[in-house]
Image (tube, rainbow, N blue to C red):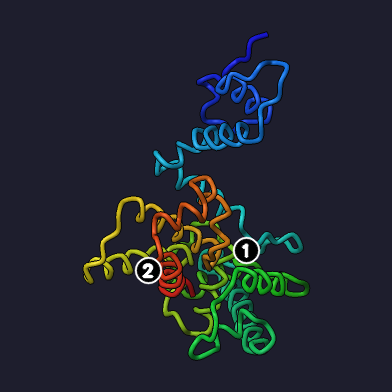
Amino acid sequence: MPAKRVSESDRNRCPNRSEIRTEARTRFNVPADETPSERQIKAVTESLLKRATAPLATRPAFRDLVLDLKRELEQVIDEVSQDEVLEAGTSEEAREKARGLVESFERYIEEHKDEIDALQFFYAEPYSRRLSFRDVKALAEAIKAPPRSWTPEKLWRAYETLRRDRVRGTSSRRLLTDLVSLVRFATRKNDELVPFGDQVRERFSGWMAQQQNRGRAFTPDQVHWLEMIRDHIATSVEMTVEDFDLAPFAEEGGRGRAEQVFGDHLQEVLAELNGALAA
C-alpha cells in the first residue's frame, strides 16, 4: 500500500509518530517494508514541528493567547479554604476582614523575612542575588499552608478593598508571579499594586526606548526573541540559558538559534533583561 503524505488539514497539528514515519517514507522514498533512518526521522520531525508551530510565529495575536493561557495555568490554586467575600458594597464588615488579612500578611512577611529565601531577597540592600521562580513558588506554598490558606487572589482582593485607588489589574486572574508585586507593595517598595506581568511589559518598553536613545538597534529577529524572553520573565520571574530548551524557544531553534540571533552578546542580553525586567 503506497505511503500517504500528511494532509494539508493536519498542518497546524503536532505530528504523531505514525505521521512522522509516513512522511519520512514518502520524502526519502523509503520502501514500505523498511524503517526510515534516525537521520530521516529527525529531519522530518523538525520540518513538521516548524509547520505545526507556524501560527505562533506568523500570528502574534494567537501567540499572545497561548501565553495568556500558560500564565493562567501557572497560578496558585487554593484547594484548602473556601473563598470569602471581602467586599460587599461599602460594608464595614468586609473592610474589617480585608484589613485583618492584610495586617496578618504584612506581619507574616516581617516575622519570616530571615527564614524564607524570597523574603530575604526583598529585604537585601542591594540585592545580592536574583530572585528565582523556585523562591516565589516556595513562598506561595508557605502562605497557602493552613492555618493561613492565603492565595495571591485573596490577598489582591483584600488590598483592593482597602486601597482601590492604589490597585491595578483587579479584573484579571492572579498569577504565581503576582506574589512579587504583593510583597513589594506590602513592604512599601512600590506605591501601587500592579500585576507583575504588566510591570515587566512596562519595563521592557522603557528598556527598549533606552536602547534606541543610545543608538543600539535590534534586527526584527532579535526583537522577536527579546519579546519571547520578556514574556517568559513575566510568568517565571527570570530567564536562564537553560530556559531556551523550553517552549516557545525550543520550537524556534532553542539555545542554538538564540546564539545565532545574538552572537556573543546572548549572555549580556539575558543579564540586562533580568536586571531591567525582574524584581
The percent position of residue 187, horizontal first and vertical second, equals: 52, 84
Q: Describe the element under mark 2 as helix, strand or loop.
A: helix
Q: How many numbered marks are there?
A: 2
Can you identify the residue that label 2 sits on?
203
Q: From this view, report whether residue 116 is shown above or below residue 149.
A: below
- Three-letter amino acid code at disc 2? Arg
**In the figure, is residue 148 to the left or right of 225?**
right
Residue at horizontal 41 percent and vertical 43 percent from the top: 61
- Say which amino acid is labelled 1: Val
Q: CA distance from mark 1 to mark 2?
A: 33 Å
Place of residue 186 in the rendered image (x, y in percent of width and height, measured from the top left): 53, 81
Q: Position of residue 82 (x, y in %)?
A: 72, 61
Sooner in the amino-acid sequence: mark 1 or mark 2: 1
Residue 44: which quarter of the image? top right
Front residue of this view, candidates 70 and 145: 70
Q: Is residue 128 above or below residue 213?
A: below
Residue pictured at 50% horizontal, 57% vertical: 172
The percent position of residue 45, horizontal first and vertical second, equals 59, 35
Report whether 212 appears left or right of 45.
left
Image disc number at residue 85 = 1
Judge by depth and name the residue closer to the eye, 166 or 63: 63
- Which quadrant would the N terminus be assigned to in this image? top right
Q: Residue at x 57, y 18 (%)?
A: 5
Outermost residue toward the top in this view: 1
Q: Residue at x 59, y 78 (%)?
A: 102
Q: Is residue 139 left or right of residue 8?
A: right
Kindly report which numbered mark, 1 or 2, lies closer to the viewer in this rendering.
2
